[in-house]
Image (cartoon, rainbow, N blue to C red):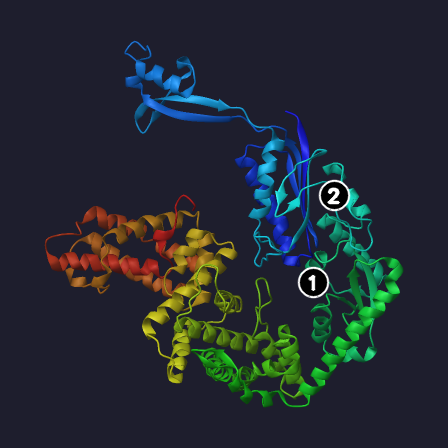
Amino acid sequence: MSKRDLLLEIGTEELPPASVEIGIKQLREKASALFARYRLGFEDIKTYGAPRRLALFAVGLNEQQAKAVYEVKGPAKKVAYTEDGAPTRAALGFAKSQGVEVESLVVKIVEGGEYVYAIKEEEGMRTNEVLATILPELILSLSFPKTMRWGSGEIRFARPIRWIVSLFGDEVISFTLDGIKSDRYSMGQRFLAENPIKIQKPADYLSDMEKGKVIADQDRRAALIEKEIERAVKDTGGRAVVHKHTFDEVLQLVEYPHAIRGSFSEEFVALPRDVLITAMESHQRYFPVEDINGKLLPNFIVIHNGSPEFDEIIRKGHERVIRARLSDAKFFFEYDSAKPLSSYVEKLNEVVFQAKLGTVLQKTQRAMKLSEAIAKEMGLPQSELDYAVRTAYLSKADLLTEMVGEFPTLQGVMGMEYARTSGEPEQVAVGIFEHYLPRFAGDILPKTIIGQIVSIADKIDSIAGIIAAGLIPTGSEDPYALRRQAYGIVSIIIENDIVISVKSLISLALNLYKEQGVEFDFAPVADLIEDFIRGRLRAYLLAQKLPSDVVAAVGSSSIDNLVDIKARGDALAEMLKSRELADILVAYTRCKNLAKPDLGIQVDESLLKEAVEKGLYESATKVQKDLEEAGQNYVMSIEVLASLRKPVDAFFDGVLVMVEDEAIRNNRLKLLNYCLELFQRIADFSEINPLEG
């Protein structure tokens, strides 16, 4: 079948960087689905994006739709044919109504019955005719977080559409969208190109755009930006500080990248590193420059669309901008530092944490009590306990500083810097920064014990309060980032082997809200919080590559000791294919099938009549002792539990559990409960999938 390439370019006003990323991804996905729906075969799909365009390039698109094959159900076979196989009037009439020969009818078995089917083929349309219909549909199917209407039109898009290129081979696929007629004319860079640019065929697109000073291929544009940064920084003796989020934004802000290195006064280098970097990256999207030791140099790299002949003018403009930004930052830093950090704390009473939950000062006071409780449970010395409480006290103070007001992403960072200038202990300063960690997926965890304690305290306070207020995250909605905070608690506790009672922590957090006068039903809310954290625990364990059935087995019961849960999960995963686990699964299942937990586990030895039930009881008591001696060596514990297989089998083979004598029957059920309780100290083995294991 003959093929042609397809080019669709949607030309717009400048798109937000996020919309370019979304458009690139959606164009590929939606075009693939649309072509499949309309039976248009193709070899490959490529999508491109730049500040003023989204483009689809379909390689080797068939010139005609594939045939459509339909199956139409007719009468039952016994009605359609006589006993000797001759077609009846019913078959003849059905074939005629479907426009097929009666000989072409086929018989299929459907839900146990045999029916006649007509197989019909429909020739496909020419692709250029189909494209004229579906390309506008493709454009309108793109969705963005924020859209707009323009002029008198009714359609919505991320930014106003200004032109459309639509070529199938060298043929224009003609359609009109909101008054814009598709054609073969695109637009190059606003100031450097001779516009419009005529595109003869799809294969010319990237080269024609480059002649028009637009690098439409985002991958090539990214490589060019990297090369330009290296060139600009080469003779400084340093290297550019390139953060992914800044690079990704710059990538979608320029069409024809060119780098310029600017400079600023040495006096600003004395500012904290994070202040300098944030001032350069925020709004300006500059790349800072550092020496080989990581010290920032008084330079920056800016990527722009301008011609190299205007470098000097553009450099001076950017240097004026950064001078103003850094002057503001220097003023904020000096102004904020003139007062001790502690002087901002009481003013937090004027800042609302959440309408139903009071002020940030009240949150601070709760975090102090939670931090103290955690430090005590961990058995820390008084000095570290004091550091934890002091850190919690100062943890939110920087929210009221001028610097954080201007650069909100510096919260915590500035608290650390201002704590240092205020003469606070280094443990407190670092703890203030670390209590926000992790701030996003993949972020670092607090390294110091003080940072870990206050981070846990701050996060459990937020989770408890927000859920008590009835604001439980639903679906993808999580405005208070509770999932991230719960995941942070789980990660911090497990990865630092912090043995604390999560249930006690939840209870204390809720009681502190009760003391404050927040009204809620304690027990159900506590259960909700425990379930919420359990969900994040499971996500964490799955991220650690534990099998899903193991995660279900160890994560379905109490979450009080997270470190212990992880240890049991690791051991169970290690033993998943062992003979010992296979024995446990048999014994566990036999016990669970008859066990009645409501009866308890107190076995009356005087009621044990048969040798096999006495033997099972003796084995169980020995297993209990061995489990206690094994402690947290859970591989050994699994091996110990496996020893119950033989006495359990002997018990079921040798006695009837459900005898008429109620006392003996209940005592045997208690014995099974006792065995079940021993197994469940490690996991709920009913969750283990033998096939996976």
Residue type for callout 1: Thr
Mark 2 — residue?
185
Tell me the quarter of the picture where residue 346 sits.
bottom right
Q: Residues within 10 Å of mark 1 (few under 14, many from 20)?
A: some
Q: Describe residue 663's horizontal placement relative to residue 19 as left or right.
A: left
Which residue is at 34% across, 59% downward?
680
Which dot marks residue 377? Answer: none
Q: Which one is closest to the eye, mark 2 or mark 1?
A: 2
**In the figure, residue 555 lies in which quadrant?**
bottom left
The mark total stands at 2
Residue drawn at point x = 40 percent, y = 84 percent: 516
Q: Is residue 175 left or right of residue 586?
A: right
Depth order, front residue of 172/16: 172
User: Label 2: few (<14), some or many (≥20) within 10 Å?
Assistant: some
In the image, taking residue 529 as reference, residue 185 lies left or right, namely right
The residue drawn where x is 54% and y is 85% is: 348
* Percent position of residue 155, x then y: 57, 51
Residue, disc 1: 246
Question: Is 107 on the left-hand or right-hand side of 674?
Answer: right
**In-front residue for pair 465/21:** 21
| SS for dot 2 | strand
Query: In which image quadrant can residue 308 be found?
Result: bottom right
Separation of residues labelled 2 and 1 (CA atoms): 32 Å
**Mark closest to the chain's N terminus, 2 or 1:** 2
Q: Can I make out residue 246 in this image? A: yes
Is residue 631 visible in the rendered image? The answer is no
Q: Where residue 59 sits: x, y (%)?
A: 67, 36
